[in-house]
Image (tube, rainbow, N blue to C red):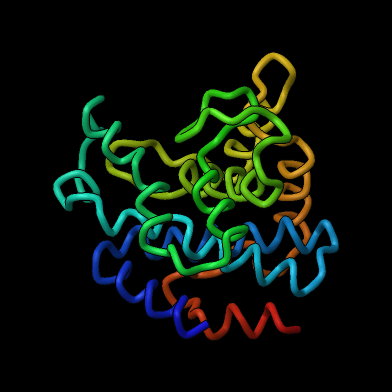
Amino acid sequence: MKDVEHYLELLKKKDLNTYYHSIRVAQYSYLIGKTLEYTNEQLSFLVVSALLHDIGKLYIPDSILKKPSKLTEQEYEKIKNHPLYAKKILQDYDSKLLEVIVTHHERLDGSGYPYQLLGSTIPCFAQILAVADSFDAMTSNRNYNLVKSFQEATCELWNCSTQENNLYNSSFVFSLNQALHTDTLQHPKMKQYTLQRFFRKLEE
């Protein structure tokens, strides 16, 4: 946990928005795993993966990471390298954890990155991160992106979980939707939601 906090502190100093995004993605991933009745060990693995999923952005220039307008195609190609940067930063971590972090932008239809993996070749926990990451991206305030409501974001995830548009695992989208309607953590004030409080919840 100390190593995780160390890396998150570095991320916090680098970019506050990415730091809070990582915490929210960990929260949504936790809710999905909890709904699926994962063990505490599995939940811990999932949460740590989520907290560190964007750590590779430490290597992304501030001019790109903090750009207030939409990225150019060239800038987007550069930011797509962040999963591979994470592999370098966390090279001493467990190989299975690294595999999840590196593949969280892969999509079931092979359209993701960095390896264009297909379907079941994408680690299960990476598929969960993909849902949580995309959900938060759609529901968070960005200067170049209209914020969607939870319902709108869930509907878009559903639309991208069909045979015709197969990006996300529909069972994980369903689990997130179910959790958001039942869990008391569904609307936390995340800027006041400390890591210590989050992990106390995990240990319950």
- Where 177 falls versus 186 (above or below)? above
In depth, the one of 97 and 75 nearer the eye is 97
Specify the farthest residue to the top: 164
Specify the quadrant of the image occupied by residue 181: bottom right
- Residue at the spot 67% in from the left edge and 45% down from the top edge: 123
Specify the farthest residue to the right: 37
Specify the quadrant of the image occupied by residue 59: bottom left
The answer to whether 64 appears left or right of 141 in the picture is left
- Residue at the spot 57% in from the left edge and 68% down from the top edge: 48
Q: x, y percentage for residue 122? A: 65, 39
- Residue at the spot 33% in from the left edge and 45% down from the top edge: 142
Q: x, y percentage for residue 108? A: 65, 29
Specify the quadrant of the image occupied by residue 35: bottom right
In depth, the one of 198 and 86 nearer the eye is 86
The answer to whether 204 appears left or right of 144 in the picture is right
- Where 171 falls versus 97 (above or below)? above
In depth, the one of 129 and 179 nearer the eye is 129
- Where 63 falls versus 37 (above or below)? above
Q: x, y percentage for residue 155? A: 65, 32
